[in-house]
Each structure stands twice: as structure tokens, then as C-alpha cells.
Image (cartoon, helix red, strand yellow):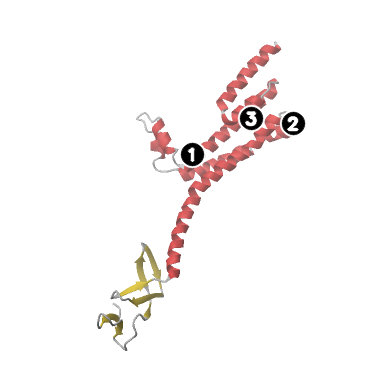
Amino acid sequence: MSPYFCSQISPQAPILCRAVQPSIVAEQQSFFVFGTLNKEILGERFTSKACNIRVQCTFLGGSRFVTPKVFQRNISNSKDFVVSASWLTSSMIASNAFTWATVSVLPFYTLMVLAPNATLTRRAMKSDLPYVVLGLVYAFLLYHSWSPDTLRLMFASKYWLPELPGISKMFMNEMTLASAWIHLLAIDLYAARQVYYDGIKNNVETRHSVSLCLLFCPIGIIIHVITKVLAKAYSD
């Protein structure tokens, strides 16, 4: 309890702040330093070994605690930091992984389409590095998107088979969605490489089939099979 109290002598007279010791003029601000103070202000709990609290008398009567502006700003900044950190670890990581993984596979498709018989293309397609990189990124996103409900959503039926409602609910998570996209990129690139090698082996045009494998992999494989059949029939 503060050693100061406010009283009003008359309706016209100003409010005077009195203390146990000498009288002090109205609206004088006093500062008290406490050794240790645990207080909860605006839902934020803080602990300080030396905290300045200002007690101010007002014309409305009584006294009130006024927290320093620096401390209020620190509370606001701490909340902003928590929100920013949460945003960076989820949405932004998933978005960056989605973008850079997509960009990373484009040079391989470009080589297979524009220069299928070049030495650089043959060497690039023999490398397993893109699949290792995509696999590591996929594992990272899968780890951070995993939750106790993942298996339940994947095998929701009584026969332990995936069901569309559960899968769609699981893919509402951006991390899960980004991991699924990178999974598709790796599989599509691998299928495109197989189509490319098969075309070189059988002397069949594969540019159109490889292009389709980028976004429509099953259709690209079907078109390659049709192309092989037509090329063989035409050669015979």
C-alpha cells in the first residue's frame, strides 16, 4: 500500500497529496524501487530485480501505477517476435521449399528437351544428386509436418486404407502440402529420366513426353509408349 494518499479540502481547492512524512504538492510523482517484483501486466509475467514503479495522484482520487513506456514497448515487441518466429517456421519455410525445389528441377527438363543428345545432358541425367537433395528436403518437411493425428488421418477406414476426407484434411497443413509437392517433383523427374533413357536406347523422340512428365507424369509415360509403338510400326 502506498504511503501517499490524496484528499480534497473543498470542491474548489486542488487535491493535495499527503504523506506520513512532510506534505508534498499535488500531482507529485513518486518512484519506488523494489528488490524483487513478480507482477503480471497485460497478460505478460515478468521478473526483475530492480523495477521502477511510478505512483501518481490524480484529480479523480486515489493513486494508480504507471508502467514505464520502455517496458510496455518491450512487451509489445516480445509478442511480435513470437508471432514472427511462428510464421517463419511454418508458412515461410514451406513456401520457400516449394519454390526452390520447383526451380531446381527445371534445368534438367530444359537439357532433356533442348539438347537431348548433348554430352552435358547425358552426364547431368546420370547424376543422383537431385534425387538426394529432394529426398532430404522432403524428409525435413515431413518431419516438421508430422503430428499424432497423421497416421489416423492416413488410415482412417476400418480396413486401414486411406480415405479421401482424411487425406484432404491432412493436406490442409502447408508443411504437409509442400512435402507432397516435393515428393511429386522427385518422382516426376525420375520418370522423365527413364523416358529419356528409353528414347535414346530405342532411337525414339522423347521431347514431348519428357515435357509432359514435368506436370502430367502419367500422361507423359502414356504418350511415350504410344510414340514407341508408332515409331516401331513406321520403321517396319
Give whichever of discs 1 and 3 has the lower sequence position.
1
Identify the residue position indicated by label 2 in the image. 118
Residue 193: assigned label: 3
- Give the secondary structure at mark 3: helix
Q: Tell me what residue is drawn at x 57 percent, y 42 percent.
A: 99
Give whichever of discs 2 and 1 has the lower sequence position.
2
| Dot 3 amino acid type | Arg
- Residue 36 in the image: state x and y as whole percent: 37, 74
Kindly check if marks 2 and 1 are in contact, taking CB atoms under 8 A apart as contact: no
- Give the secondary structure at mark 1: helix
Specify the quadrant that holds the C terminus. top right
- Residue 108 in the image: state x and y as whole percent: 66, 35
- Residue 156 in the image: state x and y as whole percent: 37, 33
- Residue 66 in the image: state x and y as whole percent: 37, 72
Mark toward the viewer: 2 or 1: 1
Residue 125 appears in the figure? no
Q: Tell me what residue is drawn at x 63 percent, y 39 percent.
A: 129
Q: Using the numbered discs, state the Cα–Cα distance from disc 2 to disc 3 in whole angstroms.
A: 15 Å
| Dot 2 amino acid type | Ala
